[in-house]
């Protein structure tokens, strides 16, 4: 039941704010089961959640941008996932904490310059590698997509498409390296039940929340992630 409720909360958060839910899931699982188990479980569950979100918002998807980013992000996630299999747990925890640090300081940074279309695939490659190692794809993809000119539903739908590519790539690597045990697969399936429910809840909530309120919710979630990251590396 706890995993289902976590999935609902994560799905709602990401659908409302565009990012954050996957990182909350990753950090809570990491604190309970360790970073490698958290990466494997979250990859499988978030693949389901983002596929459902993409289906819900498919009419708003900006296909050219999604394709360019995924062309780099998918192989990058495979490479990052293979690397994560042999990195020590302590190093993975520090990488996850570093991603959380990026999430906390991102709102304080000045607006990023416009990213040209030719740079989307190389940028996706780098993001995919880091995601395979440390998760947190949403907060890394967000500034890339926003700086390419996307916003609103188009941004959230395209972000979901990119996430599907990255989670599929890293999940394949985790399975090939033996990180996805039967027990972890069961946990991922339970968590995956809650994510689509959370997507539906978030879709309803988004009609009643201003952009400012959505941003406040997201930053509060990132503050929680910061606390969880400190707990995980303590």
Image: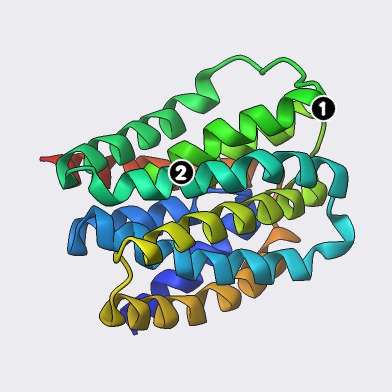
Q: Residue at x 15, y 41 (%)?
A: 90
Q: How is the image coloured?
A: rainbow
Disc 1 to disc 2, C-alpha distance:
23 Å
Observer-nearest of 68 and 98: 68
Residue at image mark 1: 117
Q: Is residue 216 visible?
A: no
Question: In the orientation shown, which residue stands out farthest toward the front?
Answer: 176
Q: Nearer the viewer, residue 139 or 77?
A: 77
Between discs 1 and 2, the one toward the N terminus:
2
Place of residue 127 in the rendered image (x, y in percent of width and height, measured from the top left)? 54, 35
Q: In the image, is 141 to the left or to the right of 151?
A: left
**x and y, in percent, of residue 22 in the image:** 47, 56
Disc 1 vs disc 2: which is toward the camera?
A: 2
Height in image: 38 above or below 127? below
Q: Which mark is residue 79?
A: 2
Q: How many C-alpha atoms fall within 10 Å of the one at disc 1: few (<14), some, or many (≥20)? A: few
Instruction: Look at 35% across and 57% down and name the residue there.
Output: 39
Answer with left or right where residue 164 lies relative to residue 145.
Answer: left
Residue 32 in the image, given as x and y percentages of width and height: 19, 63
Which quadrant, please, contains the C terminus? top left
Element under label 2? helix
| Residue occupying image coordinates x 51% and y 64% | 46
Q: Categorize mark 2 by other alpha carbons within 10 Å: few (<14), some (14-19), many (20+).
A: many
């Amino acid at each position: 039941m706890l995993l289902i409720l976590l999935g609902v909360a994560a799905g709602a958060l990401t659908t409302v704010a565009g990012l954050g839910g996957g990182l909350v899931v990753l950090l809570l699982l990491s604190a309970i089961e360790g970073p490698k188990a958290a990466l494997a479980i979250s990859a499988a569950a978030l693949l389901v959640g983002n596929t459902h979100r993409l289906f819900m918002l498919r009419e708003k998807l900006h296909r050219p941008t999604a394709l360019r980013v995924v062309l780099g992000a998918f192989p990058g996630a495979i490479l990052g996932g293979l690397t994560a299999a042999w990195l020590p747990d302590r190093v993975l925890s520090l990488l996850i904490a570093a991603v959380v640090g990026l999430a906390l300081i991102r709102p304080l940074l000045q607006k990023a310059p416009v990213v040209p279309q030719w740079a989307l695939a190389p940028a996706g490659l780098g993001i995919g590698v880091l995601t395979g190692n440390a998760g947190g794809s949403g907060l890394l993809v967000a500034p890339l997509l926003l700086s390419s000119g996307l916003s609103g539903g188009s941004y959230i739908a395209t972000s979901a498409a990119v996430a599907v590519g990255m989670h599929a790539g890293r999940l394949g690597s985790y399975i090939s390296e033996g990180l996805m045990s039967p027990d972890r697969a069961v946990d991922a399936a339970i968590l995956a039940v809650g994510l689509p429910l959370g997507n539906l809840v978030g879709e309803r909530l988004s009609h009643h929340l201003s952009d400012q309120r959505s941003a406040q919710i997201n930053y509060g979630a990132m503050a929680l992630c910061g606390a969880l990251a400190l707990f995980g590396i303590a």
